[in-house]
Image (cartoon, rainbow, N blue to C red):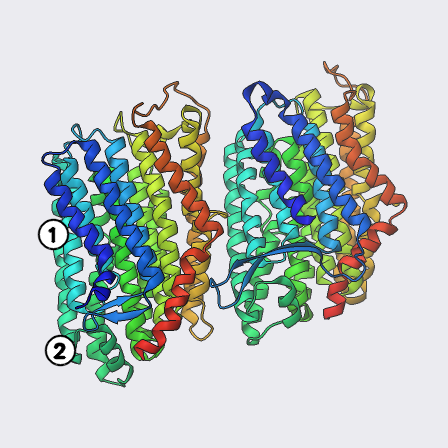
Amino acid sequence: MIALILLIPFFAALVIALLPNSLEHHSKFFALVVSLVNFLIAAIIFLISDLSGGQYIAINEVIWAQNLFPFQIKFSVGVDALALALIILTNLLTIAAVTISFQIKERLYFVWLMILQGSIIGVFASINLIQFFIFWELELIPMFMLINFWGTGNREYSAMKFVLYTLVASAFILIGIILLGYSANSFDIISINNSGFLVENWIVIFAFWTLLIGFLIKLPIFPFHTWLPDAHTDAPTAVSVMLAGILLKMGGYGIIKLVLPTMGYLLNDYGAILGFLGAFSIIYGAILTLKQTDLKRVIAFSSISHMGFVLVGIASNSPLGVLGAGLQLITHGLISGLLFLCVGLVYERTKTREINEMKGLTHQFPFISFIMMVAGLASLGLPGLVGFIAEITIFLGSYETRPITTLFAITGVLFSAGYILWTMQRIFFGPRNKEFDAKDISDWPQLLSVGTLLIPIIIFGIYPQPLITIMEQGLNFLIRIG
Amino acid sequence: MNLDTFVILLPPFIVLLGSILTLLSSMFLSGRLLILIIFLIFMAAILSSIINMTTQVTNLFFHDTYLHSSFGSILEIFFSISGLIVIAFSYFAYNLRDQKLLFGDYAALTMAVLGSAMILIHSVDLILVFVALETIAICQYILVSLPRTETAATSSIKYLLNGAIATAIFAFGLVFLWGATASTNIIEIGSIVSELEGGSVSIILFSIIFMTAGIAFKMGLMPFHSWLPDVYYRGPFNIIAFLSVVSKGTAFIFFGFFGFLIVNKNINDLSTWWSILVSFFAIASMTLGNVAALQSDNVKKILAFSSIAHAGYFAIGIIAVLLGNNIGLSAIGLYLVAYGFGNLLVFFISALNSQHENNFELRSFSGLFYKNKLLGILLTIGLLSLTGIPPFAGFIGKFYLFYSVFHVDYWWTWIIIIFAVSNTVISAGYYFRWIKVIFSNDLDQTTISLPSDSAPYINFILICLAIFIVLIGVFPDIIVSHAADMFSKLGSIVS
């Protein structure tokens, strides 16, 4: 079943690429149907399977290389609760990304989008480290193409910057993966987690830092964050949604999946540094957000700030903190995705992203303003919306082990309230600046796009238990091993 | 000598005899017929390699001078395929009369190089090695000069002079090695070396340094690379493609075998120093090649410098072998196949792109995807494979090389890995810049059209290369399983 979810996007990309020219303008419908089907399959797997043990389910594996390494390599896909939750999020965001780009006619755009979806799912569904890395790298190509050819502004520079930063991250991760495979004598995530390390301590420390730096670049955390604002600013809306919504989460997923089970005990020594780095990233991102005048950059920098919470949660080395980090991955995926959608909708109508040029948009676009307000409030952690539940869990978990870092990090919430409310006030409220020649949302693709992310934000905000349950199941393996 | 042992030699013999046959028949046969004969010769060679691979076990033949193994056979098949592809591409894509390349000469020389390469990768006697190396080198000097233009002559002379010096250095080291061990058999030398201790290592180390320098010359490793950019820049594309894959590849495979048989898991002072020496070469070549390529806007220069950088990656496998890790040799084999097919693809499409206006600037590729969709996509595949992006063969090749060199007890292997992965990132700079140009939209409305009568053949050759790249990337076991098989059998023979 999981292999099906993984293969469908690649197959869809192939079919869209081979559509006859007369059907090219229908490729968007095809992409939409495929992502809906994929979402449904993922949802069915979630509903029918028992994930409570925290183990991998629905494993499909084929022997891939018998002689390549001193041990056998299998091509194996499967999911546990954490991976499945992130796969469902990927599918949701893809639906949103496809529907928001309905005005694009070229088929190539949707081909790349489908390949992007497939490779992200591949990252989450891989049980084998080589395969994990293959999909991790594969995601580069569609991102490069999408930013480079459908972006705006300084897109070529940003696309190249994105590629180089990601490749640097990959380089670190590659070294870490080689070390993991060498020392555990296997590239299988399950058996690595079971056997642990067989080599001296200093190698473990080296592996810990290389993997961590690689994932922190992707997350991104200060001082490795500079690629993110550029990539976001110049990417098309759908790519910003995917980038903020799910690509950043791959970094967090990597830390939770690869670093914590085998090398988590090193957090006793280095957790303080990482926690401080996370807290600093929160504050730093927040302060920079206050200074931005481009609406997309505001959200990009707020993403840096919010991903800092993930690191604080993980570095706390407490079950509750890691749970909060896992929750933050999902909730921030939904919220930042929705925020970028709204920015895209505003930009489409006003043709500007400069905050100073907008004013009183709520008079003309009440619906968009409403949605963006909801997303913004969720982002600043308003109780009743989904962002709150993740942040409070992180703080509760982190306060047990690192009270000072936590207090430092909590000030970030004040900042985020500041920049969100201030930005909203500047663009939506006040007297109307000028009349824009556009209407509020009324066509169904954009409604669907916004709805796919808005509904879970509200539902899980009011009733977060299912989200918490799935995360607890997903992080079970840490407790079992630890 | 009974027939059974002669069968072992069939693949190189078929190709070498085929070379003579081609040379003779080119005088009175038409081009079409000639290419058919060449095709049949290579098919026969591939078939005999396959038969050898399946029926013969790993063993030494001809008074311990010739080591047959299934790994060697699979490399023979690789050489046959790439030779056939190069010759066929040159025939179909180049108007040979205009290029002043006599097709018969060209094909015969290419096949002579391939036949000697097939002997070289099997030989375990230094005399045989020397003869094979020289045959390859001399044929290549002529090959480079074949277009009979002034630039080609300059390039050939430069290649000849530098190559002669390299040969002298190599022979110098060889003589010392013979003087120290009284043997030219690599396996015997290996067993003598393994018993050495202390001061007597130094004379062997001295000779090994010279031999390494000589081979490094042929491979284009960093301190001995100076001939390479010039020869590549001036030489014709199809011949340079052949040089960069086959001749460098053989040198690496030979060096890998040489190191493997000499060291044979007995790590002592000699192999440690030797590996440190090669480490310097590897790091220097990777860094210099990639940084220089990054600053170039000319496709030929980019390819020349990237080929120096790739030589550095190959050297990583040799370091692994010298530190006693067998899979270094399989990694060299795998990377050779991955790099070879990727490089041929990139070279060929560059040749097609710049055929008419003779323009090798990077911007002549702008909008290639919109001018000719197939070429654009295939070139992108080739470049991604050379960068090392999955699922193409270059990725698994690089991953395997980096994995093979990693060794807990030797700290400098860590530095090599760090340099190697950083260089992969640097190389992405120019490869992705190239890809960006291919897909860029500023069209100058010219289309690239292949000559209509040969277009299907050219497309077929290029698509075959792309399929090989994906196939090896997804199923690397095809190459590597034979190496594993060889190591398990070789252990009993060598010790």
Q: In this view, does A353 lie to the left or right of B303?
A: right
Residue B129 to residue B343: above or below = below
Confirm whether circles 1 and 2 share one chain: yes
Give me the C-alpha separation between circle 1 and circle 2. 27 Å
Residue that label 2 marks: B179
Mark 2 residue type: Gly
- Tag 1 near tag 2, CB within 8 Å: no
Q: Which of A110 and A49 is in front in this view?
A: A49
Q: Give the mark nearer the N terminus: 1 vs 2.
A: 1
Question: In the rendered image, which quarter is residue A89 located in?
Answer: top right
Q: Which of A232 and B430 is in front in this view?
A: B430
Q: Is residue B460 left or right of residue A52?
A: left
Residue that label 1 marks: B161
Q: Mark 1 lies on which chain?
A: B
> What residue do we see at 24% from left, 65% from top?
B4
Q: Which of A91 and A426 is in front in this view?
A: A91
> What residue do we see at 57% from left, 54% from top?
A131
- Residue A415: horizontal and vertical position, in percent? 76, 45
Question: Residue at the front extreme?
Answer: B3
Residue B284 can be seen, yes or no = no
Mark 1 residue type: Leu
Q: Is residue B38 left or right of residue A89?
A: left
> What residue do we see at 29% from left, 81% from top?
B194
- Residue B369: horizontal and vertical position, in percent? 44, 28
Under circle 1, the secondary element is helix
Q: Residues within 10 Å of mark 1 (few under 14, many from 20)?
A: few
Residue A226 to residue B214: above or below = above
Residue B495 can be seen, yes or no = yes
Disc tally is: 2
Q: Mark 2 lies on which chain?
A: B
